[in-house]
Image (cartoon, rainbow, N blue to C red):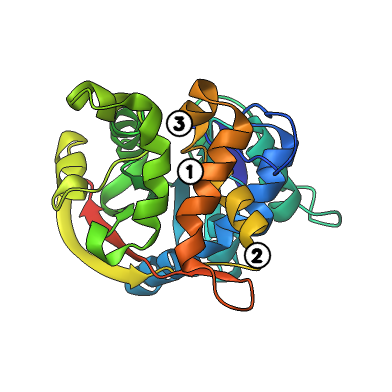
Amino acid sequence: MSPTLVRHQLPHSGSMRCDDPPVPAGSRARTRDWAEIQERMLVPLYEAAYDRLGVGPGTRLLGLGCGSGLALLLAAARGAQVSGVDADESRLELARERLTPDGMPEHTRLVSGGLEDAAPGDAAFTVVTAFHPVGCVSTVEGLTASLTAAAGLAERGSAVVLGGWGPVERCATAGVLRVAQRPAGPAGADAVGSAGWWPSGRDDLEELAERAGLQPDGSGRVACPFGYGDLASAVRGLLSTGLFDTALEAAEQRQVEKELAEALHPHQRADGTVWMPNVFRYLIARTR
């Protein structure tokens, strides 16, 4: 099976450069910020899941919300056959550049369409990943539907990996991400639904798996520190996640950037770098 990347309606995110006019999610500039600054922060999560599942030759992997393709690239480097879906066409374009560089064999196939277009021709998937952390706005309902559909393309008993934030007290970035909640105001549950991030619950991943008809089969925690060369890079990287899109719609960009910088200041070291230790959690579930 050749690497396959298709456009599919999953939660979007983008990136934004400091001092630039607001740039819509999915733009090339925001995608570059995500790929060059932020995406690498989750590499320990990807590698831990791949190690636990023994991803390698013989693995047929489908990445939901594959973004600009770093997780797929790591799996392919292990010998896995990979496919990916994402709603953000700008990120998919970059993923295609990474996974099908000049000189790749002609049989490499990239298509654009629905989730069904990601299905391998003569064999079902053996691993499905959804690394996009649960706890981000508008992800749960869409992700549940995508997981249910993806399970239908996988072998019975295949592994499905769900990613999420760890306990809020173990995630230094949690305090910074609360900037994304401020425009919502103290409106109770409705405010949570309109904010860009909320703290993960203890059983969020298990509940998502059960909603999608999957059987939980073990979990783990991984240290995923967020480190940046300077404060400006930290602001750009965090804006690239898409978690602050609601805040950017409710307030001027400079105000959001100012609040982000203030929240990041306690994490800035004497040499100007920014460092925030975090713990992420993953759940291994199985298709029935």
Rendered residue at 60%/60% (across/down) = 73
Q: Amino acid at mark 2?
A: Asp
Q: Position of residue 193 (x, y in %)?
A: 28, 26
Q: Position of residue 55 (x, y in %)?
A: 43, 68
Q: Is residue 142 above or below residue 163?
A: above
For the C terminus, the image quarter is top left
Q: Position of residue 77 (x, y in %)?
A: 60, 69
Q: Mark 1 = which residue? A: 122
Looking at the rendered image, the disc whose residue lies closer to the viewer, 2 or 3, is 2
Q: Amino acid at mark 3?
A: Leu
Q: Mark 2 = which residue? A: 230
Measured Cα–Cα span from mark 2 to mark 3: 31 Å
Lower position in the chain sequence, tag 1 or tag 3: 3
Rendered residue at 48%/30% (across/down) = 247
Looking at the rendered image, the disc whose residue lies closer to the viewer, 2 or 1, is 2
Q: Position of residue 53 (x, y in %)?
A: 34, 68
Q: Amino acid at mark 1?
A: Asp
Question: Would you say residue 127 is visible in this rendering?
Answer: no
Residue furthest out toward the right:
103
Lower position in the chain sequence, tag 2 or tag 1: 1
Mark 2 crowd level (few <14, some 14–19, many ≥20, 10 Å Cα): some
Rendered residue at 37%/33% (across/down) = 182
Q: Is residue 279 above or below residue 7?
A: below
Horizontal side, residue 217 vs residue 11: left or right = left
Measured Cα–Cα span from mark 1 to mark 3: 25 Å
Question: Would you say residue 250 is visible in this rendering?
Answer: yes
Looking at the rendered image, the disc whose residue lies closer to the viewer, 1 or 3, is 3
Q: Nearer the viewer, residue 271 or 47?
A: 271
Q: Mark 3 = which residue? A: 10
Query: Contact (CB < 8 A) between labels 2 and 3?
Result: no
